[in-house]
Amino acid sequence: MSKSGAPSHFFRSLWDFFASIRLTVVLLLTLAATSIVGTVIPQNESPEVYARHYGETLFRLMDFLGLFDMYHSWWFQLLMVLLTLNIVVCSINRLSATWKIIFARSPGFAGSRFRKASNRVEFTASRSPEQLRELFEPMLQRRYRRTDSETTDGSLFLFAEKGRWTRLGVYIVHFSVILLLLGGLVGSFIGFEGYVNIPEGASQDTIRLRNTNQPLKLPFAIRCDDFSVRFYETGAPDEFRSRLTLLKEGRPVLQRDIVVNDPLRFEGINIFQSSYGNMRPREVVLSFTSTESGMTYTRKATVGTPVDIPEGLGQFVVERFHNRYQFMGMMDLGSTFLGTLTPSGGEPVEVALPLQHPDFDKMIVKRGIRKSDVIIAITDFEPHYYTGLQVNSDPGVWLVYAGFLVMIIGCFIAFYMSHQRVGVELVARGGGTQVTVSGMSNKNKMGMNRSVERLAGHLSRRVGTEKIG
Amino acid sequence: MSSSLILSVATFLYGLAAVLYIGGWVFKKETIGKAGTAVTAAALVGNLAGILMRWAESYAMGHGRAPLTNLYESLVFFALCVTALYLYVEYRYRNRTIGAFASPLAFLAMAYASLSPNISDRIQPLIPALKSNWLIAHVITCFLGYAGFAVAFGVSVMYFVKKRDPENKSGRLSRIPDLNVLDELTHQTVMFGFLFLSIGIITGAVWANSAWGSYWSWDPKETWSLITWFIYATLLHARLMRGWHGKRIAIISVVGFLAMLFTYFGVNLLPGLHSYAQQ
C-alpha cells in the first residue's frame, strides 16, 4: 500500500463509522439510558451535601465521572458531539442520492416497475387506448405535478408523480437538530445566566452568574420601585409583581412591571421574576400591654429609636431583623425583630417579636420564660420586600427557535408527505381497453394503496364502466 | 348537573365500552363490538362535555382557566385524546378488536383520576408559573403525543398476542389484524405520537424560556420527555433505515410507552419544576 493511501483509507473508515445507522441506534439508546442518571441524582448541589450522602469514596468516584453535573460532563457532551457527527455524515452520505432523484431532468418512469406493484386496480372501458389517453391525461395533470407517457408494443403507459421534494423531509429534521445544537453552543459561549436580589427602592447594576458565582456588571442598573405578592384565599400564590425601572447613567430609560411569564427584555438582556423575600420593615406598630393594669398602648416605632413605655414601665428599642430567626436555636419563627427592653430600674433584656406570631411574647411572659410586667407585640408593619430576578442573555435562542420551527415542519413532511408515483396502463382488448392503475411511494404504502383505489375510481367513473377487480 | 357527575358517567361508560370490546372479541360477535363503538362514542362526548363544563365552572368560580392544569385534569384529557385517536384508527382500519386493547387504557386513566385518594378533583386557581398562553398548546400537544404512544402500545401488545398463532383462520386470533398491518399501525401511531411529543417539548421549551429565562434546564420531566423522544427516534430509524419490523419494533414501542408513563407519573417522585402536576 502506498503511503498516501493510508490517511485516505483511515478517513474512509472513519467516514463509514459515522455513516452507520447502527451507530445512530447505539448513540440514541446510550443517551436515553445515561440521561436517567441525572434525574435520579439531584444535580448541582453543593459538594458537602453529596459527600455526606454518598460517603467520601463514592463521592470522589461520582465526582470524577461528573455525575453531579452530568449533562455538562465531558462524556455526555462527547455523546452529543458523536450524535451530531453521525447526523451530519449520514445526511451528506444519503443526500446525493436523494438529490439525484429530486432534481433528475427526466422523471425516469418505467412501466415494468408499475406492473410489479401489488396495489394494481383494473377495469375495462369500451373506448380505444388513444381516446382514453385524451380523457385521462388532463385528469392526471390536475392531480399530479408531473406527467409523462410511454408507448411500448401493444400498451400505452401514462405516468404521473408528485411530492418529489418531500424526500427532503428527513434532511430538514436533521438540519433542525443541528440548528438546536448550534443555538445551544452559541448560548453557552456568548450568553450568560445570573440572578440578583434588589430591595424595594434600591437599584443594582451587578448580578451574580449562576454557574461560577462571579459578579457581572450590566450596561444598565435595575431599580425595584415596588414589589407585591398576592395570594388566593386558599393560600396558594396568585401573582408576584415587580415594578422595575432601568437606569442608564442614573437616568431612567424604561419603566415596566414584570410578573412570572411576562419578563422584561432590553438590549438583548432578559429580566425574569424569579423569587422574593422579606426585608426589614421600615416602620412597625408596637403594642405594650401592662400585666398589672391590663391596658394596651400602641406606638409607632422605627429601628434604633427608643420608645418610652407608658405607665413608667421603661424603654424599648427595636434593633435587629432576622429573616429566619431560630428561637433558642430550635424554633423557626420566620421574619423576626429583636429588640431590647430596659425596665425602669432593671437590667436590659432581649425580646423577640416574630412578625407572623404577634402573641409570641405573651406566651413567653405567661410561661414565665421572661419575668416582666409588660408584654410586647408587633401588631402591624409595612412589609418591605426584595425581588429576586433572573437576568440572562442568550443570543443563541433565535437559532434554537428556528430549529424548533424547522423541526416541526420537517417532521410533518417526513411523516405525512411522500413521493407518489402512479402508472395507468392502457392495453387494447377486443374493441375496448383494459385499464390498470398502480402506484409506488417511498413511504406510507397503505396511503398509496388508498390513493390508487381513489384514482382508479375517478378514472373509471369518467368513462362510465364498472370496476372489475 | 356538574362536571364531576358527567365525568363519573363517562368513566362508567369507558369501563362498559372496554367490556363490550373485549366481549365482542372473545365471543366473536360483531354486534357486541358495534355496541362497544357506540358506548365509546357516548363516553367520548361525555368526557368532552365534562371538560368543557369544568372550564365553565372555573369561570363561575372566578378562576377562569383551562381545565388542563393538574394531574386529575390531565388524566381526564388523556382519556379523551386516547379515545379520539382510537376511534379514528377503528374507522380507518375497520377493526374493533383493537378496541379491546385501547379502550381499557382510557378507562384506567379515568378510573385512576376519580378513585385515587391522592388526586384532588377540586378546581384550583392557577399559580403564577402556569399563567401563560403556552399552557394550552403545551398540554394539548403533549397529550396528543402520549395518546399516540398509548395506542401504539395497545397495538404492540396485540402484536405479541397475534404472534402466538398468526395463521389462525377461525379462532379469536383471526379477529386481530394481520401482523404486517399491526406493524404498520404501530409505525403510524408512533409517528403521530412522535410529531406531537416533539411539538409538546418545543412548546414547553418556549414557555420555560418566557417564564424562567431558560428553554432547557434538564429538569427531570424535561429529561424524561427527551429520553422518551430518544427511544421513539430509535424506533423510527431502526425501522426506516435498518428495516426492523415486527417483534423488535413492538418491543421498542412497549419500552417507549413505559418511558412515557414514567415521564407522566414517575417523575413526580423526583424533585423538579413540574411539581404542580402532582396533585
Image (cartoon, coloured by chain):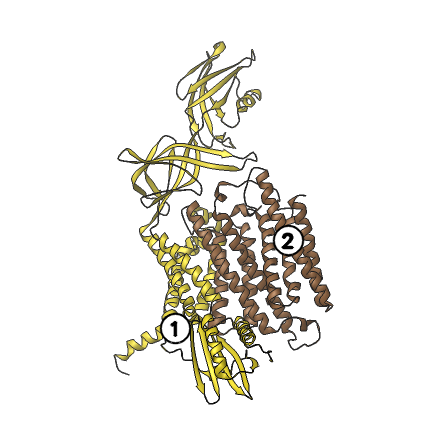
Chain colours: A yellow, B brown
Against A459, residue B124 (above or below) is above
Q: Are marks 2 and 1 on the same chain?
A: no
- Say the numbered circle drawn on residue A102: 1
Q: Work out which quarter of the rendered image holds the N terminus of chain A and state it.
A: bottom left
Q: Looking at the picture, which amino acid does disc 1 mark?
A: Ile
Q: Looking at the picture, which amino acid does disc 2 mark?
A: Val
Against A314, residue A266 (above or below) is below
Q: Position of residue A83 (x, y in %)?
A: 40, 65
- Say the numbered circle drawn on residue B45: 2
Identified at 44% across, 45% down, the residue is B211
- In this rendering, position of residue A293 left or right of residue A242: right
Q: Work out which quarter of the rendered image holds the C terminus of chain A and state it.
A: bottom right
* Local crowd size for mark 1, using a 10 Å CA cut-off: few (<14), some (14–19), many (≥20): some
Cα gap from disc 2 to disc 1, whole angstroms: 46 Å
Q: Nearer the viewer, residue A14 or B108?
A: B108
- Return the chain for callout 2: B
Identified at 45% across, 66% down, the residue is A414
- Identify the image quadrant of residue A337: top left
- Identify the image quadrant of residue A399: bottom left
